[in-house]
Image (cartoon, helix red, strand yellow):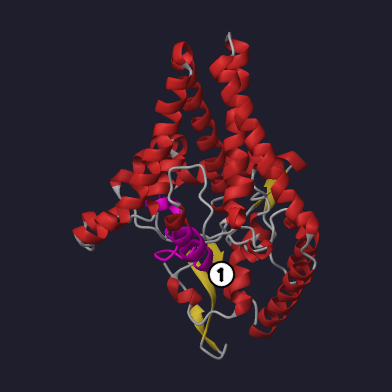
Amino acid sequence: MSTFTTRTDLEPARLDALAQELDALRLRVKASLGERDASHIRRMQKIVAGAEISGRSLLMFGWGPISWVAGVLSLAFSKILENMEVGHNVMHGQYDWMNDPTLHSQTYEWDIVCDGGHWRHSHNVEHHNHTNILGKDHDYGYGMLRLTPEQRWSPGALIQPFTYMLLAALFQWGVAVHDIKIGRYVKGRMSRAEFAERVRPFLRKAGRLLFKDYVLFPLIALWNAPRVLLGNLIANLLRNLWTNAIIFCGHFTRDAHVYMRNEVANESRGAWYLRQIQGSSNLQGSRWFHLLTGHLSHQIEHHLFPDLPAPRYAEIAPEVREICQKYGINYNSGGFFKQYFGVLARIVRHAWPSRPRVRSGIQRGPAGEHVAHVIVA
């Protein structure tokens, strides 16, 4: 068995110094927010709308395979950009300071079947606060995948490469049911009334979007209805595959750390920052690549500062990397294919039974004092 180094290797004084540097960086960026940030998100809204109009027009009124492919790609591009660069980032509160009701985190509703209120709770509250803590971060494996030896193995894990392919193809649906907590209801830990209350917003949202893509627009297209129906289906599939790949690359690469609950007890601000860095992974690419990922290609920066406008991540990434080097923290970054193949390898590897790794580190008490070495066999 291999040794797994936990975040407690940094001394309390070093963790405090790390927190001070990262806090100062965040405040400096917050103080500089202004018109260029507002212009960016408004420009993205216009591009999303233009690409959707173009895509739907090509599907509805075009003729032949070339216009159909162009329509699918344009519509998929619009859906990806709306979900990643606009919806995800707006719902994090990155543009609340603009006081624009169309860009406010509590009122924005994005173009996927997941209800905005459900997502704000499961993602903003549960995932970002409890990143990669087993049993608390319900995004870790999405309740469907075993990604570390510390997770209990069951025979169902053997088919998880196929489960993952299904999840990737239907990713917006996986995200949509995530906060409903179906597992809790099935196990009798949730009343029928509470379950019905959780399901209701999902059914309303899913019904609206299913009607729009698979009833309304095909009906408007008249004789081109089959072309529009199939085009909308493929555009949604492409969006699902892309967003799934980017999100999994941000959290489940080979070097992304996982934490046990006892390791984060009495966690300081510096330890929280360190967990966000060690539990996240970056992707390298061009400006347009970063836009299409919603700048989640800078997942480390996003987890450190989820309320900063996402385009700022690329600007501060060199400084964050320098801070990591200063404190001896691994800055997990790589090309898309390298990181994604690492994710796929992790899914396949942990489909098979394995024993927990030896986890060595320093457990600390409430005041940061050295308590004991932690070893989990």
Residue drawn 75% across and 56% down? 37
Where is residue 367? Give x, y as percent. 56, 91
For the question of whether residue 353 can be seen, the reply is no
Residue for badge 1: 6
Residue 170 shown left or right of residue 64 in the figure: left
Query: What segment carries the magenta color?
Result: 120-146
Viewer-side residue, 219 vs 290: 219
Where is residue 239? Give x, y as percent. 54, 35
Task: Name the image quarter holding the C terminus.
Answer: bottom left
Where is residue 111? Give x, y as percent. 51, 42
Is the residue 360 above or below the residue 346 in the image? below
Viewer-side residue, 37 vs 183: 37
- What residue type is disc 1 on? Thr
Residue drawn 23% across and 63% down? 189
Disc 1 element: loop
Residue 318 shown left or right of residue 292 in the figure: right
For the question of whether residue 183 can be seen, the reply is yes
Residue 252 shown left or right of residue 97 in the figure: left
Residue drawn 42% across and 21% down? 219
On whether residue 127 falls in the magenta region, the answer is yes
Residue 271 image-quadrant placement: bottom right
Is the residue 297 above or below the residue 218 in the image? below
Where is residue 289? Give x, y as percent. 71, 40
Viewer-side residue, 255 vs 209: 209
Residue 111 shown left or right of residue 305 in the figure: left
Is the residue 340 above or below the residue 224 in the image? below
Is the residue 325 above or below the residue 140 in the image? below
Count of marks placed on residues: 1
